[in-house]
Image (tube, rainbow, N blue to C red):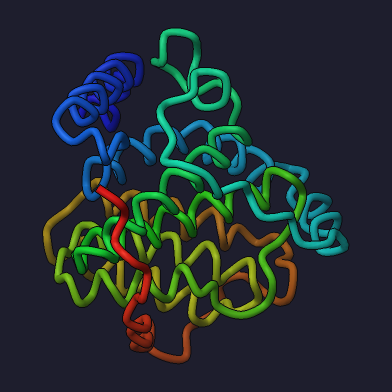
Amino acid sequence: MLHQSGETAEAGRLFAEAERMQREWQPQYPLLYSVGGFRYCDWLLAPAERATWRVFGGADFQAAIMTAATMPPPSPAPTAGPPLVPDAATAADPDGLTATDPLAACIEVERRATTALVVAEAVGDLLSIALDHLTLARARLLRALLTGHLPPPGPDPEVLAAVAGLRQAGVIDYLLHGLLTAAWSLALSGDPDAARAALDEALQIARRGPMPLFEADVLLYRARLGGGRPAPHSAMLPRPRGGRMPPLPVPPKPTSPPPAA
């Protein structure tokens, strides 16, 4: 709540304290995971998302798109190694309160979500698995755009897994997060009809709630992605062919071994 109301420094302090308590309670899992980890990563990604929208939602949108379309795919973020602890040099300021480097924050979040996903898959927690896929999708999309790249054509497997998992878990507010990320990813990767359908479904859910803040988010995404500016492959959000984003496949059953105690 503090993060969403703009109290970012206090939210960061409490996230850091919650993770310290997590390490004391479960030393084998030193990072926040499941819903807590998702919310912490959302806090870490906020500056990256703001920085990205400033580029891809501003007057230089067309130049950014044209430049990104000619770039090779970004290299994967480092994810190997033991579970990470908060790193003030990459994810936050020296007090651990405010994210400072948007690109470094994306890399940190990718590493965190990769670590958390192993835990979630080991216990078979549908919501946690879906949230970790969603966090990975967001972090990778933001990192690609911040480094001048576009996602490749076609749906992002992380987005597919996230939306399908959130549907299975049946948690509507988090499904809205997934649909918004799906719309952004799909619009930039060349499927404007699916992007529009994702936003339409999200708007329907938000109005039915009612969830006015989510409704405002959907309308902002629609304006940003529509906006009358050229898209990388075709018009961003034309009239949809269908009213709802088509059902997505269920991700395959994970085979990762459980983490060592």
Q: Nearer the viewer, residue 88 or 54?
A: 88
Residue at (20%, 69%) from the top-left corner? 124
Q: Nearer the viewer, residue 26 or 224?
A: 26
Q: Residue 8: where, in percent of width, then height?
A: 34, 21
> In the picture shown, does residue 15 fall above or below 222?
above
> In the picture shown, does residue 61 fall above or below 204?
above
Q: Residue 71: where, in percent of width, then height?
A: 85, 59
> In the picture shown, does residue 164 fall above or below 89?
below
User: On the picture, is 49 further left or further right than 9?
Assistant: right
User: On the picture, is 106 further left or further right than 229?
Assistant: left
Residue at (20%, 77%) from the top-left corner? 168
Residue at (29%, 42%) from the top-left corner? 37
Q: How many marks?
A: 0
Res. 255 image quadrant? bottom left
User: On the picture, is 173 further left or further right than 152?
Assistant: left
In the picture as drawn, the residue positioned furthest to the front comes out as 261
In the picture as drawn, the residue positioned furthest to the top comes out as 95
Residue at (34%, 88%) from the top-left corner? 247
Q: Residue 31: where, in percent of width, then height?
A: 32, 36
Q: Quadrant of the N terminus?
A: top left
Res. 199 image quadrant? bottom left
Q: Residue 236: where, in percent of width, then height?
A: 62, 70
Q: Nearer the viewer, residue 208 or 251?
A: 251
